[in-house]
Amino acid sequence: MTDRRFRVVAGSAAHLVNAKSGGALLAASAIAAAAWHEWAHRRVLRAGLPEAHIRVERLSDLRGDTRSLEAVEAGLRKEWGAFGLLGFENIWEMAKEAGPTIFIASIVEDGLKTPVGALQTIRGDYHGDPELLREEYTDFASLTGHDAWRKSQRKGGDTAVLLQITVFAKDGRGGGLGSLLRDAVLHMLPDEVHFALTTTPADADAVEIANAKTFNPAMRFHAKGGATPTLLLPGFKRPGADETPSPHGQDVMVMRYARDDEGHWSVPEPEMRTRSMGPMELQVTYAVKRLSALGKRGELAIGRIARRRRRRTFVGTAKAIAWLDDQKMWVIGQTGSLARHSRGWVSRVERVVRPRSVDVESAA
């Protein structure tokens, strides 16, 4: 950077932080940046499909619904055997560690929720290339291991791996529920997800990537939605020594969905009403749910947190105080913040502001 350009940039920065001219602009810029971040990183929590009377939501949002969780666990174990819970001991562990990227479809009638399907996904930066996925994870167990889930939740990625699509009720298969769930989930994924890779069961000895006539029903299901077969992984879903084999076999075909140049998926977006939240709103909502679940203990915890925070902020030297009565006063802290406190929490003050109606001698 030349000296002239450096002086220009430095002058601009000085203007921004100048107390007289730039303070308000800097504060406004910070607020605008925070608001933009909150909006740009909003996440679709659930979608209501009014035509089918189905709600699609994340497994993490069902953690307080024991009945639904037990139904989901039973359906996944029945369909996929040892792979149903993706390596977790039970449904509660899966909801805690992998819940944000697992989607559950439920029929809601008269306030009663009945799970009817699930789509389990995991995120990663594979740029839609299954070879990169295979280089990082040699089998399904490693793809759904603890480290993979931790990386998925912390870093996300531009590719969603559709691990398993499950329709729980037999009469729901072939009726469009699987495609409806897939279409809804693809359109619920964040904008930064540009690709989706499947781990579709396929017989390596019978299927040919270039010959659509050899596709099994699962592959035809994805091909009809616009996915293209890209890589065959023999033995990718091989169970462990003490695990029950999956009824769908051990071989996997990776099929690839991708957004077009305008950001649209190949499957149409179903008619749905979505609810979304930003990162800060999600954290507040989660904290409220946790404290609400604690009941009376949660209320006491909130009170203790608030008292400790006030003491930490205002104990010591206060910038100024203003008496209100014999017991309470307004305290202006060193940061300029204002809070009502008992005068015993302030050890020393720089300035005392007294209303005219208060006698100085009596107040002293």
Image (tube, helix red, strand yellow):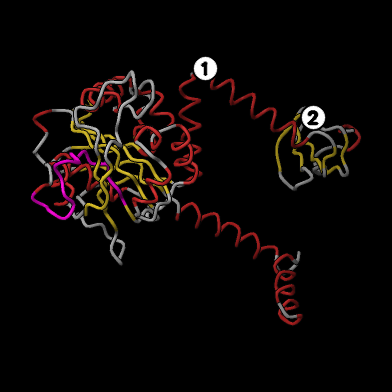
| Viewer-side residue, 137 vs 332 | 137
User: Mark on residue 259?
Assistant: none
Q: Residue at x 12, y 53 (%)?
A: 211
Q: Find out whether residue 206 is within the magenta segment.
A: yes
Span colored in magenta: 196-213
Does residue 41 sit above or below 359 in this rendering?
below
Q: Badge 2 is on which residue? A: 345
Residue reaching furthest to the front: 205
Magenta residues, dominant SS class: loop
Does residue 173 sit above or below 275 in this rendering?
above
Q: Nearer the viewer, mark 1 or mark 2?
A: 1
Q: Residue at x 76, y 64 (%)?
A: 19
User: Mark on residue 296?
Assistant: 1
| Quadrant location of the C terminus in the rendered image | top right
Q: CA distance from mark 1 to mark 2?
A: 27 Å
Image quarter for residue 329? top right
Identify residue type, mark 1.
Answer: Lys
Identify residue type, mark 2.
Answer: Trp
